[in-house]
Image (cartoon, helix red, strand yellow):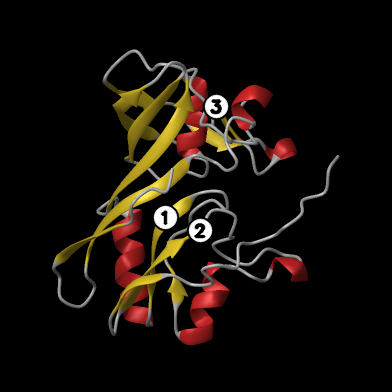
Amino acid sequence: MTLFQYQPPLTPYLDIIYQDDDIVVVNKPSGLLSVPGKAAEHRDCLEYRVKLVLPTARIVHRLDMATSGVMVLALHAEAQRQLNRQFQLRQTQKHYIARVRGRVAADQGTVCLPLICDWPNRPRQMVCYQHGKASVTHYNVLERSDNVSRLLLTPVTGRSHQLRVHMQMIGHAILGDKFYADAATYHAADRLQLHAQTLSLTHPASGIIKTFSINCSF
């Protein structure tokens, strides 16, 4: 078995797109952990980098290491409490861009497949109708080429690896996905082709709905 080699990107080291007294919104690059791993060499992560300049920053949600895009962190306990509640109650809205293998036939659709950790093969997840947690993803086709479709993905739930498993289960694995794609689909891109493009939330202090967007690089 090949050992995991963690080589997080260093440029840009930290890309802050919005900051006020309550929250900070950052552009997480593909290849950077959201939070530290257990090993000392996995300490470098988005949370660590933000805390170097904003020591009170607190994690609210996560993106997979291979996924890029919008992440919000709270800057004090009350902001964290309010944002945690919004994510738990599904009051936030998230949109992702993905490039997947094959021509997705329907212009739009919904995937409803319950997910659970594939414990012997963690961090992989799997569909399990008996014990899995309800997981829902809407998709819209933005573009089709010969053997690739570009999708807008809107997760209703926020399960680990949800978008990756749901796309693989409908026969359209995400390009560059080392966990769920076949070898040809994995090697079709130099990174996971999944990007958190937009995040809408209610600001914990003002109560105003704010939307943060970061253009996709692929």
Residue 156 image position (x, y, % from top left) = 32, 40
Q: Please report contact status of discs 2 and 3: CB closer than 8 Å, yes or no.
A: no
Q: Which callout, 1 or 3, points at the residue further toward the start of the chain?
A: 1
Residue 69 has which mark? 1
The image quadrant where one finds the C terminus is: top left
Q: Is residue 95 above or below residue 167?
A: below
Q: Residues within 10 Å of mark 2 (few under 14, many from 20)?
A: many
Name the residue carrying label 3: 128
Label 2, label 3: how far apart the Cα atoms are: 31 Å
Q: Residue at x 67, y 71 (%)?
A: 43
- Observer-side mark, 2 or 3, equals 2
Q: Position of residue 213 (x, y in %)?
A: 28, 56
Mark 1 or 3: in front is 1
Disc 1 versus disc 3: distance between alpha carbons? 29 Å
Q: Which mark is residue 145?
A: none
* Quadrant of the image occupied by residue 42: bottom right
Q: Amino acid at mark 3?
A: Cys
**Location of residue 55 with respect to 201 vertically, above or below:** below
Near-viewer residue (66 or 208): 66
The picture places residue 15, in percent across and down from the top left corner, at: 43, 70
Asked if disc 1 and disc 2 are in contact, CB closer than 8 Å, the reply is no
Name the residue tied to disc 2: 29
Q: Secondary structure at mark 3?
A: loop
Name the image quarter holding the N terminus. Answer: top right
